[in-house]
Each structure stands twice: as C-alpha cells, then as structure tokens.
Image (tube, helix red, strand yellow):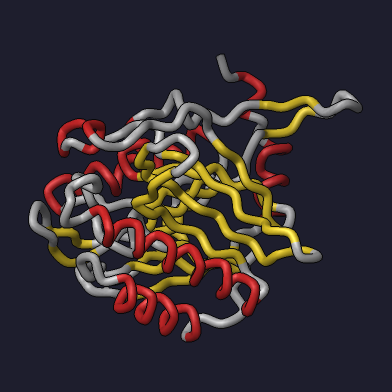
Amino acid sequence: MKITLLQMDIAWMDVDANIQFAERAILDAPTSDLYVLPEMWSTGFVTNPSDTSIRPLVLENSVKALSWMKETANRLRSAIAGSLAFYDMQTSTYRNRFFFVKPDVEGSSSTEYYDKRHLFTYGGEDKQYEAGISKVVVEWRGVRFLLQVCYDLRFPKFCRNELITDESGISSPLYDCILYVASWPETRIAVWRTLLPARAIENQCYVCGVNRVGTDASCTYTGATLAVDPYGRCLAKTDDAIPSTVSFELDLPKLQSFRRKFPVLNDMD
C-alpha cells in the first residue's frame, strides 16, 4: 500500500488556501492508496471555536473541507484522512475529529471518524472541545489503521495494540498502522521524534506522524513528518520547516512475517 503524508503550512482560517495546497500536493503524488493531512488542517489549531468571531468560520470551513475530502476520495478512488475542528450538531459539542474518508461504494458513504481522546489541557483545548471515549480502527484495502491525534502520542496505554480472536479461534493484532496527525510545536519536537518510533516498536506496527509547519498566534511548527517501520526505523521523512510531501510503501506481508517470527504481542500484559 502506498501512503502519502502531507506536511502543510496551514493558512489560518483560510480553507480555500489549505484545500489548494492539499490538492496540488495530492496531484503531485498520484496513485497513492491513502493521503494523510495534519491536525485541524483546514483552519489551524483553533482553541476557541465558540467565540462569536470564530464560530461561523469553523462551521463553514469544516463543511467545505469535509466535502472536498469526500469529493477527492471519490474522484481518485483513494482514501483521505485528517482532522478538523468540527461542530457535532447531534450533541451540540465541538470535537477535534479525525476523519478517514474512503471512496463511496454503491452510493453509500464510507466516512469514519475518531474524536481526539486526550485534549491538550496545557493549551486550553479541553475548555471548549468534548473528548472522545473509544479508540477507532479503520480498515482500508486490507490494512487496519488506528486513528490518533497529536497529544494522544504521549499516552501509550490508550493506543496499546491487542490480540483479537475471531469466531474460528484465530488471534491477530487489532491494527497494523497508527496514524498520528498533529500540530506539534518546535519546542517539543524531540519528544515527537522519540515517541513515534517507540509506539511502532512496542505495538509491532507501522507508525505515520503527520505534522505541520509555519506559525500561528501561539507556536512555531517545524514538521518532522515521518513514517516508521515496526523495528523503529525511519522509512521516509519530509524536509524540516517547509511544506512538503513524502510517500512510502506499507508492506503488510513483511509485517505479518515479522509478527509470526517474533510474536511479541503474545506476551503482553
């Protein structure tokens, strides 16, 4: 499976500019099975979505961004993933919602999502967003992806892989790859570079970390977007501090072979 990671310099509250960048980047990396965008890629990291001057923009941007994700997935027959600042009308709550959009099948929507579990209290995210409860695994073209957002990276218990037994009694890991989408600042980038390989090693899976670059009112971001294999080795990475994309091949048979040869997950607590 070919996966392309998009490291964006997110234009603040400018969904059209952000869509234009994502569109160009995707067209420059054709034939990928999955394209992954950063956290809150259509707006930048919004901590005050209910503010009267911000709320209409958040609503407009999320609708337009999600519509573009669906249209692009259908047009390219590829999956598009990334988080949005999103207002859930059913619960009347704001969510940092990680959408995984697949091409529609026979007219039915194939959009799944995960609501960020660990809200960034240090930055005030918990004051206006509602936290998710459950971890979410999405299957796409035979690969199972665990969806995670930024601060989730610091909490290994929540993302711990586990063995699932099917009706025939065969056990297999819950997922094959973790997707982390983030707005991870330059001041803590060493933590980012350390924890991504750690999550890959301890869960015997691939890990993709997709970060942004540029600045907003609070932080400077330097990217460090990368893909890591189950041994903790970097498979692909972007250039730091500039908008860029990188693609890599997720080798599922190789992962399965490694798990059979060295069944670490069988011995977990």
Q: Relative to 176, does residue 165 appear above or below in the rendering?
A: above
Q: Nearer the viewer, residue 61 or 97?
A: 61
Q: Is residue 239 left or right of residue 38?
A: left
Q: What is the residue that sits farthest to the right in this orientation?
A: 168
Which residue is rendered at x = 45% and y = 35% of the image?
A: 91
Residue 60 in percent (x, y) is at 35, 63
Q: Nearer the viewer, residue 125 or 189?
A: 125
Which residue is rendered at x = 35% and y = 57% of the image?
A: 59
Tell me where residue 62 sits by quadrant.
Answer: bottom left
Q: Nearer the viewer, residue 263 or 125?
A: 125
Q: What is the residue that sits farthest to the top in this orientation?
A: 269
Q: Is residue 164 left or right of residue 45?
A: right
Residue 18 in percent (x, y) is at 32, 73
Residue 140 in percent (x, y) is at 68, 55
Q: Is residue 84 visible?
A: yes
Q: How many marks?
A: 0
Which residue is rendered at x = 67% and y = 30% of the image?
A: 263
Q: What is the residue that sits farthest to the left in this orientation?
A: 217
Q: Relative to 66, does residue 264 appear above or below in the rendering?
A: above
Q: Is residue 200 visible?
A: no
- The N terminus: image quadrant: bottom right
Q: Is residue 79 left or right of residue 257?
A: left
Q: Nearer the viewer, residue 100 or 166?
A: 100
Q: Is residue 121 left or right of residue 166?
A: left
- The C terminus: image quadrant: top right
Which residue is rendered at x = 31% and y = 37% of the image?
A: 129
Residue 152 in percent (x, y) is at 37, 36
